[in-house]
Amino acid sequence: MAKKKFKAESQRLLDLMIHSIYTHQEIFLREILSNASDAIDKLAYTALTDDKVGVNRSDFKITITRAKDAGILTVSDNGIGMTKEEMEENLGTICKSGSLGFKEQMEQSDDIDIIGQFGVGFYAAFMVAKQVTVISKKYGEDTAWKWVSDGTDGYTIEEAQRDYAGTDVIMELKADTEDETYSRFLEEYEIRQLVKKYSDYIRYPIRMEVSKSRKKEDSPEDKPEYESYMEEDTLNSMIPLWHRAKKDVTEEEYTQFYREKFFDYTKPLRTVHTSAEGTVSYKALLYIPEKAPFNFYSKDFKRGLQLYSSGVMIMESCEDLLPEYFGFVRGVVDSQDLSLNISREMLQHNRQLTVIAKNIEKKIKAELKNMLESDEEAYGKFFAQFGRQLKYGAVMEYGAHKDAVQDLLLFYSHKEGKPITLKAYADAMEETQEKIYFICGESTDRLAKMPQVKLLADKGYDVLMFTDEVDEFVAQTLMSYKDKPFCNAATEDLGLQSEEDKKELEEKAEQMKGLLTFVQETLGEDVQEVRLSASLGDAPVMVTPGTGMSFEMEKYMRRANPDIPFPSQRILELNPNHPAVQAMEKAMVGDTQKAKDYAKLLHGQALLMADLPLADPVAYADLVCKLMK
């Protein structure tokens, strides 16, 4: 029998596809099962208009047969089958897809849904098989045909025997090597796992003989004995939950699916079951988890939704379907508009996927806003777990996504004593308030004692307490909210002084110029400048950063990279009305050394209030003891 050569372009494409398009060998079973499902779809559709078919939908099935000793894996279906000419056309020319042709012929019908559209999936078998034999009998034909190829230079076709319409794909697996174990694809557990992972929702039963255990008939009741036996069983569940109408799915079913699919013992906070028809059609089942995975904020966490094409999984974690700031969402997306054979590289440029991703983003945001407005307690739990991720979303890509997330953010309110939204803060602002005040630190308790917070509270103004490392970056990125600029209460002008107050402070600074110079000279390089301040309330002193980054940002940057030198530009602010400062000024006249000790003591207090380290804690303790004598 003469061997027929693959066309030159087909041969090149075959080699490219086996070594490049598919990156995981296990994909081959998904492709072969999908082709079998396509073939049954075609016969099922034909049965709608041809009474002679004589096959009910319940009769259709896909069968997997293992011959472990011979190293042969067979996938059989009772679908439409192929003629000799169709074998030549569909198997001899790569990318000549019978499924695509059939779909184009029947595109006026809504009842047909063919998975494979490029015609390359079948050749994934050559990743694991040294020879592939296809025996097929077309429905309505008397003759069956056999196609054989080793995937290198060509194939043969000859007559064969088959009792009924359908196709057998017989794969003689490659021998195991040190790097690859091809024989694993003959193991029951491996096949069960792959069917569950990739083909669980193929609409026809995938059957295979599996090992089971039963009690021996003559076994005594008090000491039962068991025996193993083989029985054909269905490996797939067939009907995806997301293909059912929302009204037909119970809350328990949604929760059970989530727990089994995503290995989470908790109940999800929210479930979003949605679909779209039109230019791009898809169905999606999304979950907002209650708790963050242990590795959520690490590099090991893989975000993304499971992507399906007509019930067959294309990708386990499709990052392109979720923006990074919604990376906590788990779920599945199923679209018949996406090809089963699409690769990761092709996905990145896929228009349909972009449309789906935008719609999903809107759905997630709408669900979060609904939770925020209708169930404050639930949203608080959610934000405690994933709020930092939303904040990162506001600052990433230079604030390109800030509008998408700013209304979902929560910050601790000093006045309310709980986290609130920026909208709630803005709506509650006093009429005279021109800025959104915030202050940064590691705990709300410590920040509440800061003099600036007390001063603003006395005016009736609220202060947002930023305790997450990313919070200050958020304020810098947003710059303003509802035309109200953000103001760091610890470092910026609070805008509370009138022109008269400013003039009075300038006059006092001139009067106390000698004290300011004295403190500057005493502390030397420890401070960049010493000046008076009217924003300290009842506190004697405060240290603030000079130009550049704030103290909290400096701490964050140092933790990220301790080796980078950061200039320490610190300004010491004195309260001219505080008795401690006045005592220091008085000591300058009669006891210069005591005045110097006062300056060092107040500087140390300022550092402690700002949660900054003392250069010499022992020397500071000795100084306190000295002044107590």
Image (spheres, rainbow, N blue to C red):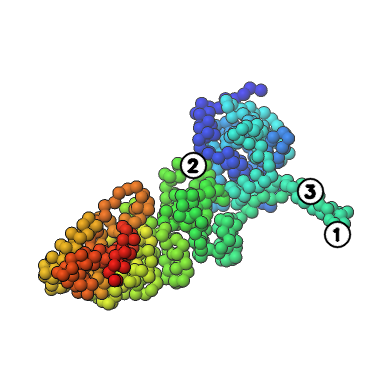
Looking at the rendered structure, the kind of residue marked 2 is: Ser
Secondary structure beneath dot 2 equals loop
Q: Earlier in the sequence, mark 2 or mark 3?
A: 3
**Residue 135 is at least partly visible in this image:** no
Give the image quarter of residue 536. Answer: bottom left
Kindly identify the residue that appears in the image at 59 percent across and 25 percent down: 4
Q: CA distance from mark 1 to mark 2?
A: 58 Å
| Residue at the extreme front | 629
Amino acid type of the residue that numbered disc 1 sits on in the rendered structure? Asp
Residue matched to label 2: 343
Image height of 394 relative to 541, above or below: above
Q: Amino acid at mark 3?
A: Ser
Q: Nearer the viewer, residue 148 or 470?
A: 470
| Residue 392 image position (x, y, % from top left) | 38, 56
Q: Which residue is mark 3?
A: 228
- Tell me how far mark 1 sits from mark 3, CA to CA: 20 Å
For the residues marked 2 and 3, what is the alpha-carbon distance in whole angstroms? 42 Å
Please state if 546 lies on the left or on the right of 502 as rendered. right
